[in-house]
C-alpha cells in the first residue's frame, strides 16, 4: 500500500518510502499508510458505483471522462443556482459572479482575519503609485482612484497592469510592516462589474480561464467578471477556488497573529504573500505547511493548547472548512464530490484525480487524459497522510516543539 501512496503522490524514491518507515516507527507502527491507502481504494470504488461504473472493467481513461461529464452537468446546475441567487438578492441581471459572492457571504462560517489597515495600505500605494492601473481604470490622479475605488480593487488593478519591478518595489515595503499596521476585521469578497472593469478583465479571464485574485495580507478575494459565454466548468472552478482562498486567508491570518512578537514580522508578511507559510520541522523530508496545523486543530478541538497559542490565538481562530462540504451546501447537485479531495486511482505512475478542482480545471481548459491535472488531489492526499499521523502524540509533540520557538517567549514560559 505504500507503493500506492508513492505512485499517487508521484513521490521521489527511495526518500518517500524511507521517511514513511521512520514516521511509522516513531509512532509504534500503526500502519497508518496502509489504512489510508485501503480507505482510498474503497471510497474510490464507491464513487465509481455512483457514476454507474464497474471498477473491475472501467479503464482509467473511461473514469477520467466520466468525471469530466459529471462535472459538466454539475456546473450547469450550480450556474443556475448562482444566477437565481443573484437575481433574487443582488440585482435583476442574474450575474453568476455576483451569485458566487452572495453564496459565499451567506455561508455560516467565521470570516474574520488579521489584515493590513486601510490607512497603512493607502500609505504604501502613495509611495508606489500604480500609474498603469490608474490609466486602465480612467483616473487622472491617485487620490481620485483611492477615493472612488475599494482599496482591494486598486491593488487588483495594479496586479493586473503593473510591471514585475513595480510589484517588487511595492511588496518590498511589506518588510517594514509591524503588527500595529494590522487589524482584526471581516474578509472582503468583491466582484467589480462596471464597464471599465469588464473591459479590463475580459482578455485576462479569457486567456487564463480563471477570474480570481486573492490578497492574503489584505484578507480580500476579488472575482473578476466572466465572459458572456464562459467555458464549461469555469463557474465551478471559480466558486471552488474562492472557497479554497477563504481557507488560505484564514490560515495566513492565524500565522501572522502568532508571529506578532517576532522581530522579523515584516519579513514574514513579505514572504507569505507568494508562498504558503511553513514550519521548519519536517515530516517525510518536507516542511510542514501551517495550514495543516490549522486543519488539525479545526478537526480536534480537544487538543488545542491554550498554553502555547494564547493570548494571540483562540480555538475559534482555527477555522478550516472542506470546500466540497461548502459546495454541497450551496448546491445539492455537488454532493457527489464530498470526501473526494484526496481520492484517486493509479494509471501507470500518474493518478486520475477525483478532486473537484482538478476536474473543473481539466474541463474548462479542455485538458486531455494524457495531460490531465492532478495538483489539488496530490496536495490533499499529502495533507491527509500527514494529518493521520498528527493524531498520534509523538508527532504532535514534534510539531509543537518546532512551533514554540516561533511564539512569544512570554506566551510559552
Image (tube, grey):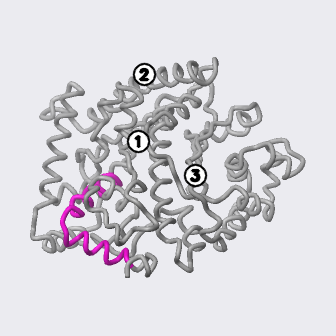
* Bounds of the magenta segment: 378-404
Location of residue 277 with respect to 50 vertically, above or below: below
Q: Nearer the viewer, mark 3 or mark 2?
A: 3
Work out whether residue 262 or residue 354 is closer to the camera in this orientation and state it.
262
Image coordinates of residue 393 in percent, x first then y, are 19, 69
Instruction: Name the residue beneath numbered marker 2.
Output: 77
Q: Secondary structure at mark 3?
A: strand
Task: Please report whichever mark, 3 or 1, sits nearer to the chain's N-terminal start.
Answer: 3
Instruction: Name the residue beneath numbered marker 3.
Output: 185
Image coordinates of residue 339 in percent, x first then y, are 27, 41
- Where does the C terminus fall, quadrant-wise? bottom left
Instruction: Name the residue beneath numbered marker 1.
Output: 357
Dot 2 surroundings within 10 Å: few (below 14), some, or many (20 or more)?
some
Check if residue 390 falls in the magenta segment: yes
Task: Please report whichever mark, 1 or 2, sits nearer to the chain's N-terminal start.
Answer: 2
In which quadrant of the rendered view does residue 27 lie?
Answer: bottom left
Dot 3 surroundings within 10 Å: few (below 14), some, or many (20 or more)?
some
Q: Secondary structure at mark 1?
A: helix
Determine the CA span between mark 3 and mark 2. Answer: 33 Å
Amino acid at each position: 500500500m505504500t507503493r500506492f501512496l508513492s505512485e499517487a503522490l508521484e513521490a521521489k524514491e527511495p526518500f518517500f518510502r524511507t521517511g514513511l518507515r521512520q514516521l511509522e516507527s516513531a509512532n509504534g507502527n500503526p500502519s497508518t499508510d496502509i489504512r489510508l491507502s485501503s480507505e482510498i481504494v474503497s471510497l474510490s470504488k464507491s464513487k465509481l458505483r455512483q457514476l454507474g461504473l464497474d471498477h473491475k472493467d472501467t479503464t482509467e481513461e473511461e473514469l477520467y471522462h466520466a468525471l469530466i461529464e459529471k462535472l459538466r452537468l454539475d456546473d450547469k446546475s450550480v450556474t443556475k443556482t448562482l444566477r437565481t441567487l443573484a437575481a433574487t438578492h443582488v440585482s435583476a441581471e442574474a450575474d453568476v459572479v455576483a451569485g458566487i459572492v452572495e453564496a459565499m457571504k451567506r455561508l455560516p462560517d467565521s470570516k474574520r482575519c488579521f489584515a493590513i489597515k486601510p490607512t497603512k495600505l493607502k500609505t504604501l500605494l502613495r509611495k508606489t503609485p500604480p500609474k498603469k492601473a490608474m490609466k486602465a481604470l480612467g483616473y487622472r490622479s491617485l487620490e481620485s482612484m483611492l477615493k472612488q475605488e475599494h482599496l482591494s480593487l486598486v491593488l487588483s488593478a495594479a496586479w493586473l497592469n503593473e510591471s514585475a519591478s513595480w510589484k517588487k518595489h511595492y511588496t518590498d515595503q511589506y518588510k517594514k510592516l509591524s503588527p500595529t499596521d494590522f487589524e482584526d476585521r471581516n474578509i472582503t469578497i468583491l466582484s467589480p462589474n462596471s464597464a471599465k472593469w469588464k473591459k479590463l478583465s475580459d482578455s485576462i479571464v479569457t486567456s487564463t480561464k480563471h477570474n480570481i485574485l486573492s490578497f492574503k495580507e489584505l484578507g480580500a478575494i476579488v472575482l473578476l467578471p466572466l465572459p458572456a459565454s464562459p467555458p464549461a466548468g469555469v463557474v465551478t472552478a471559480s466558486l471552488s477556488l474562492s472557497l479554497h482562498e477563504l481557507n488560505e486567508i484564514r490560515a495566513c491570518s492565524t500565522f501572522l497573529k502568532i508571529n506578532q512578537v517576532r522581530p522579523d514580522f515584516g519579513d514574514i508578511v513579505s514572504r507569505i504573500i507568494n508562498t504558503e507559510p511553513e514550519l521548519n520541522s519536517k515530516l517525510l523530508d518536507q516542511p510542514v505547511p501551517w495550514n495543516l496545523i490549522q486543519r488539525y486543530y479545526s478537526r480536534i478541538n480537544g487538543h488545542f493548547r491554550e498554553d502555547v497559542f494564547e493570548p494571540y490565538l483562540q480555538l475559534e481562530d482555527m477555522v478550516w472548512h472542506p470546500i466540497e462540504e461548502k459546495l454541497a451546501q450551496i448546491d445539492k447537485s455537488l454532493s457527489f464530490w464530498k470526501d473526494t479531495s484526496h481520492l484517486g486511482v493509479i494509471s501507470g505512475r500518474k493518478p486520475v484525480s477525483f478532486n473537484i478542482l482538478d476536474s473543473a480545471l481539466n474541463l474548462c481548459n479542455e485538458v486531455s487524459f494524457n495531460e490531465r491535472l492532478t495538483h489539488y488531489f496530490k496536495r490533499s492526499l499529502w495533507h491527509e497522510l500527514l494529518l493521520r499521523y498528527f493524531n498520534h502524540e509523538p508527532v504532535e509533540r514534534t510539531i509543537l516543539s518546532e512551533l514554540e520557538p516561533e511564539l512569544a517567549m512570554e506566551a510559552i514560559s
